[in-house]
Image: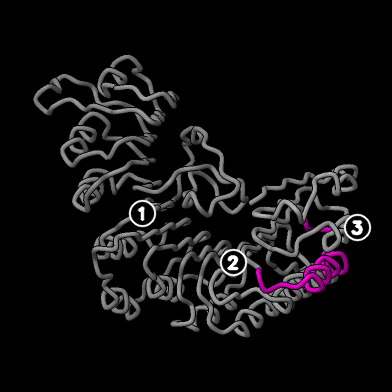
Amino acid sequence: MVAISPKPTTLYFEKVLAICHHLKGFWCDSSVILFPRRSQIAATTVPSKLKQLVLNVNPVHDSDIDRMAQLCPNIRRLYINVNSHTAIDRILQHYENELEYLNINMYLCLVTTPSSSIWSPFDNEYNHNCTRQQPLLYSNNQSTIRGLRYLALRKFNETTLISLLHRHAQTLEELYLYYNNNNETLSVQEFQNTNNTNMLFSNLRVLNVSSSNDPTFILNTLLTHVSRTTLQSLHIGSCNLSNHPMILTSIKELENLKYLHLNHSICANREDVIQLLRHFVTKSRQYHDSFSTCEQQPSLKSLLISGTYFQLINDKVLQEIGKIETLERIIIHDATKVTEQGLTSFCHMLKKYNNGYLRFLELNHVPVATFKTLEHLLLIPTLKTLILRNVANDHIKKEDFVGFFERGINVFIYYL
C-alpha cells in the first residue's frame, strides 16, 4: 500500500507502477496525476497487480481512463474524480465486471458509524465524525456473486444509474447518491418506469440519498425496491418528504433499521414525524420485551434529525425522541422552537427511558441549551460525549460543565 498526501505535487502514474511492482493499493491525495500517452505504453508492459486505487485529485479525463485501464486492468476498488458522464461510462466499460467498490466524485472519508464498512462519502457540511484516512488495505474476501457491493455517485446520468442498479441489485450493500447538477432536469419518468420492474435490492444495508435539487422521487423508487429485512442505515438529505408521504410509511416498514438520518429534509406535517418517532418508541420497547423470549428484535440505535424547514423540531418531537429506549447516538439540528421546559423534559426522558444505551448526544443550534436544561444528562451512566454547536457566548460557560468532566463525559462547545 502506498499513500501520498497532502502536499501538492506532480506524479507520473506509470513511474509509480514501475517502481512498485507488487503494489496492490495506491492512495493519492491533493496531487496532480499524469498518465502516459497510449503510444508511450510499451507493448511489453506487464499489467499492474493494483487492485485498490484512490485518486482524490484533479478530475481524470476520458482518455486517461483508457490508459489507466491498460496499465491496471485488475482494479476491484476505485475512487476517482471525473468531469463528464462519458467518463463514467468509460470506467464501467473497462471495469464494471470486476469492480466491488466504486466511488465517483463523492467526498471521501472514513466514518466512525458502525453501519458503514469502508470509504463512506458524506457532504462536508453534514458530516461530523469523519477523519481523512487511508482506506483499508485490499481484502481477498470475495462475495459468492460477482458484482458491485459499494456504489457512490455524485452528478450522475439517470440512464446510467438505472442501468447500473438493475445489473447490481442483488449484490449492492451500500448505495450513496448525491445529485447537484442544477443545469439539468431530473428524469422523473425514467425512475417511475423502474417501479414496474421486479428489481429488488436483496442485500442493501446502507442507503444515502442527498441533493441540492429535490431527489425525493429517486428515494421513493429505491425504497420501493429495497428488501425490508436488510436495510439498516438510511440517510435522507435535502428531500421534500411532504410531496411523498409514502416515504415515511416505507421507513416504518424497514424491519431492521438501526441508523436514521433526516438531514435538512422538508416535512410539512410535523404530526407525520411524531408518528414515525412513536413507531420507533414502540419498537424499542419490543426490543426489551424480546429478551425474555430469546428472540431479540432490532431497534433504532442512531438518529439525526434536522428542523431547518418549518421549524420542525418542537417540544413534542423532542419528547418522542427521548422515549426511544435503544438510541446510542442522537444528533439534533436547528431546534429553534424548543423551549427551556421542553429541553429539560427531553433530558429527563433520556434519563428515565434510555438508561443504558446513550453514548453520544449532539445539539446544534438549540438556543435554550444551557447547563440548567442539560443537568439531567449527568444521571445517564453510559453518556460519554456531549457536543454543543452554535451556542451563544452568554448562554454557556465551559466551567459550568465541571461536573460532566468529573463524570468522564467529554464536552465540546462551539460558539457562534
Distance in Å between CA atoms under marks 3 and 2: 26 Å
Distance in Å between CA atoms under marks 1 and 2: 24 Å
Residue 153 image label: 1
Which circle's residue, 1 or 3, is located before the other in the chain?
Answer: 1
Front residue of this view, candidates 148 and 271: 271
Circles 1, 2 touching at the beta carbon (< 8 Å):
no
For badge 2, the amino acid type reads Ser
- Is 37 situated left or right of 361 in this image? left
Which residue lies most toward the front here? Answer: 394
For badge 1, the amino acid type reads Leu
Front residue of this view, candidates 186 and 49: 186
Q: Mark 1 against mark 2, which lies toward the viewer? A: 2
The structure's colour scheme is one colour
Write down the residue under mark 2: 306
The residue drawn where x is 49% and y is 83% is 246
Which structural element holds mark 3?
A: helix
Which circle's residue, 1 or 2, is located before the other in the chain?
Answer: 1
Which circle's residue, 3 or 2, is located before the other in the chain?
Answer: 2
Write down the residue under mark 3: 379
Query: Which range is magenta?
Result: 336-358
Q: Position of residue 24 (x, y in %)?
A: 40, 27
- Is 351 situated left or right of 192 in this image? right
80 lies above or below 232: above
| Residue count near mark 3 (Cα–Cα under 10 Å), binned few <14, some 14–19, many ≥20 | some
